[in-house]
Image (cartoon, coloured by chain):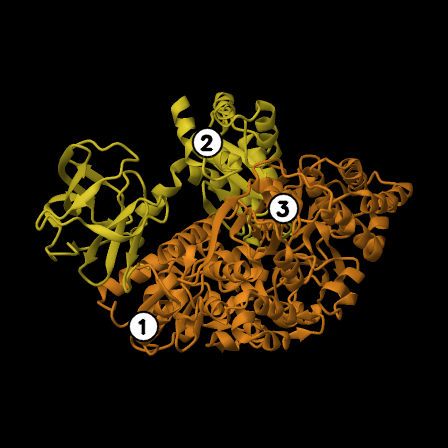
Amino acid sequence: MKADEILSIVDKHEGDRGGLISIFEDIQAKYSYLPAEALKVVADATGRSPVDLYAVATFYKSFSLKPRGKHLCSVCMGTACHVRGAPVIGGEFARQLKVTPGETTPDKEFTLETVNCLGACALGPIVVVDGHYFSKVDSARVKQIIKKTRDGLDEAEIKADRRVYLLTVSCSRCNHSLMDPDHPIDGSPSIRVTASSGREHGWIRLSSLYGSFTVESEFGIRTDTIVDFFCPHCHAELKGASACPLCRAPMISMIVRAGGIVQICSRRGCKGHMLDLNGSGF
Amino acid sequence: MERLRSIEELKALQARLQTDRDPSIPTIVISAGTCGQASGANDLIRVTKRELLNKGLTDRIRLRITGCHGFCEAEPSVLIEPRGTFYPRVGVQEMAQIVEAVAQDQVLKDLLFVDPATGKAVERQGDISFFKAQVRTILARNEKVDPIRVYNYIENGGYSALVRALETGDSKWVVEEVKASGLRGRGGAGFPTGLKWEFLAAQRNGRGKFLVCNADEGDPGAYMDRSVLEGNPHSIIEGMLIGGYATGANEGVVYVRNEYPLAIKHLMIALRQCHELGLLGQDILGTGFSFDIRLVRGAGAFVCGEETALIRSIEGKMGEPRQRPPFPVQKGIEGKPTAINNVESWANIPVIITEGAREFAKVGTKGNTGTKIFSLVGKVRNTGLVEVPMGITIEKVVTDIGGGPSGKAKIKAVQTGGPSGGCIPAERFDLPIDYDSLTEAGSIMGSGGMIVMDENTCMVDVAKYFMNFLKDESCGKCYTCRKGIQRMHEILEDVSNGKGTLDQLDVLEELAVVVQDTTMCGLGQTASNPVLSTLRYFRREYFEHVEKHRCPAGVCKELVTYSINENCTGCAACVRVCPEKAIAGEKKKRHVIDTSECIKCGACKTVCKFDAIDVA
């Protein structure tokens, strides 16, 4: 944890009065919990007393003062899930992971928690692991869910090939193809564009498989940096019309040969994207 | 996106979007709210795009990704416009076939919804009994708009109600119209919205006023607010803009619970689009009216749905309620006058302004006008969000729309109003659903959760569940709430463990009344409802637990034993899942459970295909 990282989060919310909860949420999103040192930095920066911060941090259920595991398993305990047997599911997770709700496994892999209602009541009992929803869970499936999580939930999605497919794209200004068959990525022709970030300038190759996020570049690009993309043929900037739905960075846009446009986030590491077959993106 | 500088520019944009639209082009509508995505809608979207691209159909077929359509049981569902063909529970394999069929204007009969009552396939969504009996004023809009595209909303008549309000130039007219509509707060308490607005409009302080959209939908079992926010965020923004104009408020806050990531995402996108278009901010549409909205995320505290607690939470403090008066409309956020309305109330505002108060008031009954969305969940066949006119009977909702029980067991009660509500027994299903009748029956309307319970639901366990919930969620400020609920939970725990006494039941009842009478905020005042209503209607079940040490529903773990009956075929499915290896038996012969080893986890019952596990 670095003090300047915390300070930048505090600065971000300085404008909104009473932004303490937002500050905590951002800190927790970054570190998975609220470290004591972070609270001290926030107290100094906002002028609020540490006691006051502690009160807020402990009042709200979603904040944790203890480090949490790599994977967060939330078992819904809403009424609809309850009448369909959620307590049994919660108990089975506790048994399998050998922790009680609110605790983290000793290997720091899993944190188990129960939540009051996830609002997907028709599909109960509901379990959410790292943002992935599992519906109509029965106790026999708990083991599978844990195993799937250990294997990697995103991993499984990329491999299911029917959902991953090739997009042939071209520059939205000169319409020149951006495909580079000589340098395949993921076994398919890559998309080659020019990128610039700070003083660096060079080529960058993206996987043309919709659903894959593999990237190669001429120079190293740090995670979280926003990169400017240009067409290697007409040198126009590949600027999209909207901002990234996930991180608000500008989107870059390319024409899809078969129809429509694809927009991807210009921030390194962000997976925000939109494939729009008919429309402007607004 | 270009900034709209005048009302005329907005109208011109709307006219252009409407002329550009060709309604004869078939559109594949994929329902992708949280429920849809949890059931695999994202995969369907990707496969649809793949098929449209590979087959070169992007000019001939449109694709619209929308929020939830309400029929959660059928998710992921696909709707084909303009025919109205409805495909339930679509798989990835079938999606490719559907795209092909749409291209050839055909219907895939095998994939249609089959009415369980008649056994016949039904093609059109409007003909399915679940949809037929509803009046879907708010929910039907969800399937018309892509929530992340503001142009889509404008094309469908969006922001016309705002234009209408602005064009009158008379903020009083707007307040009068909302008053005349008879709209009552959809958050549960049923306070007339127009009256609240009139109070706020009358406040003069010169420092600004607030409007709040309460989207801290904490009631477990209720998710209509999530669905509206996810599926149609612009309708909330439009409602709040109209409210701002009517009451002279200049700032709006949408307080959303953190458990709703998709609603937060869609609302953030919608707010950004409105800022870019000039529909939020200074001098909106060149009329001199200024209003801005920001989003505040909750952090998991049920009590923050209470308005004074919500205000404190918005201010970045602990969400403890405070004494009223002063009411928020006098002293709210930062001491400024504040009016708080629920998501569904806000979504109704554009409808009232567009259709007129008189038209709106035609739906429902006197004193309870308009429609109300309920989340019909639990042990009912058609689970989902249903929108019905106020005053409809519970029976109609549960049987006609809900299709009756989901399993073989009979329905015995519905629970409304979340932890603040109560259980209404099947004998009283002729009760009309309105604020006053439900209160009289010992429950409340609440935000609209309607959880159906059958004979396999134990009412003692339900009461215990809510007390457990509330003891964790009580902020602790009032002693009777903090300790009273905890004690009620302890007594219920004893009863469900078979250790309860008849004296304890009397104490329980007395305690419930004390908590009701001596607490400050709505949480404590209504906390006893689950206990009192189950004691009122299901006292017999309490007696069974106390006197006979029996749980008739087979739920209370301490009072049940698992055994295997003669239906057992000896398939050994239960043997494989039993975590304690407590089941034994020869292949193809009836198995036996060793009750001393059994931990009553229920795994065997879930895997048994022959109904051979008895719990009694």
Disc 2 from disc 3: Cα separation: 28 Å
Q: Colour of chain A?
A: yellow
**Could you say which quadrant of the image residue B536 lies in?**
bottom right
Q: Residue at x 15, y 54 (%)?
A: A171
The amino acid at mark 1 is Arg
Secondary structure of the residue carrying tag 2 is helix
Disc 2 + disc 3, Cβ < 8 Å: no
Q: Earlier in the sequence, mark 1 or mark 3?
A: 1
**Could you say which quadrant of the image residue B45 lies in?**
bottom left
> Which percent across, then down, holds residue A221?
22, 33
Q: Is B141 situated above or below B525?
A: below
> Which percent across, then down, holds residue B211?
56, 53
Q: Colour of chain B?
A: orange
Q: Is B154 situated above or below A65?
A: below
Foreground label between 1 and 3 = 3
Q: Which residue is mark 1?
A: B16
Disc 1 from disc 3: Cα separation: 42 Å
Q: Which residue is mark 2?
A: A27
Q: Chain of mark 1?
A: B
